[in-house]
Image: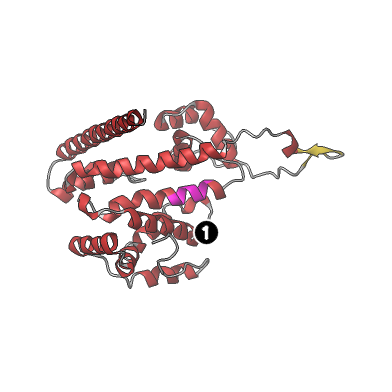
Amino acid sequence: MTARTVPIPATVEGSSVSRYLREIRQFPLLTPEEEFMLAKRWREHDDAEAAHRLVTSHLRLVAKIAMGYRGYGLPVGELISEGNIGLMQAVKRFDPDRGFRLATYAMWWIRASMQEYILHSWSLVKMGTTAAQKKLFFNLRKLKGEIEAIDDGDLTPEQVEHIATALNVSHNDVISMNRRMSGPDQSLNAPVREEGGGEWQDWLEDSGESQESTVLEANELDHRRQLFSDSLEVLTDREQHILAERRLKEEPTTLEQLSQHYGVSRERIRQIEERAFKKLQKAMRAAHRRQREEAASAAAALH
């Protein structure tokens, strides 16, 4: 299955988005047993119909996540389309034998697809090159709203301090990102001076990564995602759910909400979350160590 071969309802801009949302409600949600059997059929027999049902049953999840990114001024239909591509990639790689639900795994791919689209579309200038800068980009507007900072103009030193501390980034990163998000994009073909003398792009150095570095970075990201997916199997269903609700969502579920869901105390939920996170870290380190040892053994065998 490729990312664009599974037929799903087309998204259209404007008022037609509401029609799309009505259309995807016709696809029923799957029980854990149905999801498992469909995933096995797709994984073991390349059953396209099974893959189609897995995708269509999660279209509402994509739409829900897309609504959380409406504040960036991009068409919701395009966000949904990008998220659907991420969903298809998740279905393609999903292994039901690891014991967790497709939605838990797919959320990573859906959000990654939407965020990459936003980062490339929101500005002609690359908005974030590191994980910290991307986190700043996707949380700055929310934090400014919480402290009632004005949309235009520089932040006060107190506001910069608050945001930098909350997101664990430098003050300069906050100031720079706020200015870049507040100002419109300018054409690089604009003349430096009214009387001529060249364009702004003539003064720019090419500081971008080489194609080799880009490929290596993409492979490393894919490797880490797979490592995370493999390591999730050490957690119970409850641990996976609590960890996903507390640490993988843009707006984490509160301890109180989870305590009511499971009928235990908030402190118990916090303990389960901490334990699950440590188990996951330990499993990922062990898996990474094994892979390094296997790679070293394979290299030694060649000599």
Magenta residues, as a range? 113-119
Question: How far across and how far down the image is residue 147, in percent?
Answer: 45, 37
* Kind of residue sitting beneath label 1: Pro
Nearer to me, 191 or 159: 191
Identify the residue at image location x=38%, y=59%: 88
Residue at the spot x=36%, y=48% of the render?
108
Question: Horizontally, is 245 left or right of 15 in the view?
Answer: left
> In screen coordinates, is 178 left or right of 166?
right
Mark 1 Cα-neighbour bin, 10 Å: few <14, some 14–19, many ≥20 = some
Horizontal and vertical percent for residue 158?
Answer: 48, 27
Would you identify the image quadrant in which residue 255 lies?
Answer: top left
Circle 1 sits in a helix, a strand or a loop, which is it? loop
Query: Which of the image's four quarters has the N terminus?
Result: bottom left
Q: Which residue is mark 1?
A: 75
Rendering coords of residue 265 (x, y %): 14, 41
Colour approach in the figure: secondary structure
Pick whichever, 118 or 292, lies toward us: 292
Above/below status of 286 relative to 97 = above
Q: Residue 188 in magenta?
A: no
- In the rendered view, does 176 fall on the left or right side of 7? right
Task: Give the quarter of the image for residue 8.
Answer: bottom left
From the image, give the main secondary structure of the stretch colored magenta.
helix
Residue 173 image position (x, y, % from top left):
52, 30
> Would residue 128 be seen by someone viewing this image from the given angle?
no
The answer to whether residue 100 is above or below residue 131 is below
- Observer able to see residue 52: yes
Residue closest to the eye, 175 or 46: 46
